[in-house]
Image: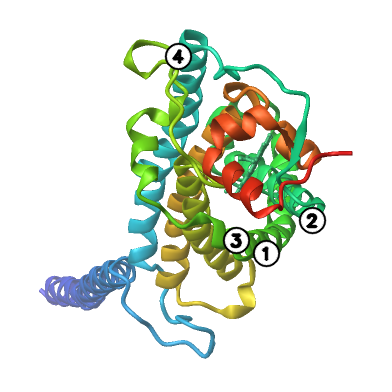
Amino acid sequence: MMIKSLRRLLTLLVVLMSVSVVMPSYAANEQTSQQMANAEQSTADMWRAVKAGEVGTTAATEVEAGVLINTFGNEGKIIKNDYINPAMMAVVVGVFSIFLIFFLVNGPSKLTKGFSGKMVLRWSRADVILHWGMAISCFALILTGLTIMLGRHIIQPFIGHEAWAFIIHFCKTVHDWVGPVFFVFWAICVLKWMPRQTFKSYDLKWFLVAGGYINFGPFKGKHPHSGYANAGEKMWFWSLAIFGLFICTTGLMLVFPGLALPREVAMIAVLVHGVSAIVIIGFTIVHIWMATALSEGGLECMKSGYCDENWAIQHHDIWYDEIKANGSLKYQD
Ligand code: HEM
């Protein structure tokens, strides 16, 4: 009897002890998983806020230091990658191909009366130097800029990792340093050449007959009036003046990190820089086609500063009549 009672007591003790051990650990488990759920929830909330661009707190004092992810930056990146980069590719390939086909079908615009052999002063030595300073720096910017913008798609897949790293570093360094050089040449050219670039009523006629460059149909043999600069050159000049201002301003904003711009402003600068580059590159391709292949005798102007007298009469008759009338016509010795 005594042993039976002792056994019951022992069993009761064991049961009580087991319950007292299991219960707290069960409670603790419940508490831990609740804490983990809470922590997960608050981490998710935090990342949602970060992705939404919310401002946090930090001891850092730089502009927008409390913003981990700038939402406008992401939107800008999408605009750049999905629209500006493909547009740039389309403009480079499209404009070049259109002019190549036009040249193959139409041929160059020849001098109707051939070369006279008498060379007339058109550009001063300073103008020629300024032109080539602007053209060479612009060319370096175009090549390095296109590599920075599109090289990831058209160069990187075909070369090794190290070669690409070298190319992109080289292009970025050249782009950063040549930018201010172009800015100086651009500013001088724009200010110096601006007075000759005002549009006149006869410029409309120039556009209507495509400048007299078409060698077939009703356009054949047409030589529209033109002053020092023709209507096409004026359009080129003003595009370069306006978009050059945009590209130089945004370029300087981007090349000096010390300016500590808010990221929205920096992203707008990137987008304006890209759009301006598309316009300038498109016009540059047209300009080089016109100067080198389409206009017989035209390139001589920027080689020596002189042009053939027949070229001046055919392409810039109003300017030629003017300098002849006021006595400033100067022949090469
Ligand atoms: C291989 C490259 C280039 C060649 C062969 C070239 C050739 C020429 C020629 C021959 C002229 C004189 C046209 C005339 O007297 O009517 C000229 C004018 C001009 N060029 Fe270029 N150029 C080149 C690149 C550039 C570039 C890259 C720029 C711009 C950054 C540029 C901007 C200008 C401007 C603004 C004018 C004056 C247009 C005017 O108002 O008459 N050129 N170029």
Please report contact status of discs 3 and 1: CB closer than 8 Å, yes or no: yes
Image spot of residue 219 (x, y percent): 37, 19
Q: Callout 2: 10 Å neighbours few (<14), some, many (20+)?
A: few
Disc 4 target residue? 215
User: Mark 4 and mark 2: span between their CA atoms?
Assistant: 35 Å
Q: CA–CA distance between discs 3 and 2?
A: 14 Å
* Mark with earlier residue (3, 4): 3
Residue at image coords 34%, 70%? 50
Q: Which mark is residue 188?
A: 1
In the figure, 7 relative to 151: above or below?
Answer: below
Q: Is residue 135 above or below residue 112?
A: below
Q: Secondary structure at mark 2?
A: helix
Using the numbered discs, state the Cα–Cα distance from disc 2 to disc 1 in whole angstroms: 11 Å
Which is more N-terminal, label 4 or label 1? 1
* C-alpha separation, residue under disc 1 versus residue under disc 4: 36 Å
Badge nearest the viewer, 3 or 2: 2
Q: Name the kind of residue labelled 2 in the image.
A: Ala
Q: Amino acid at mark 3?
A: Val
Q: Is residue 72 above or below residue 224?
A: below
Q: Are marks 3 and 4 in contact (CB under 8 Å)?
A: no
Distance in Å between CA atoms under marks 3 and 1: 6 Å
Please state which amino acid type lies under the numbered disc 1: Ile
Q: Quadrant of the N terminus?
A: bottom left
Marking on residue 190: 3
Q: Earlier in the sequence, mark 3 or mark 2?
A: 2
Left or right: residue 318 versus residue 310 is: left
Which one is closest to the eye, mark 2 or mark 1?
A: 2
Q: Residue 193 or 95: which is nearer the viewer? A: 193
Circle 4/circle 2 CB separation < 8 Å = no
Residue 157 drawn at (x, y percent): 59, 26
- Disc 2: which residue: 126
- Mark 1: few/some/many CA within 10 Å (<14, 14-19, 20+): some
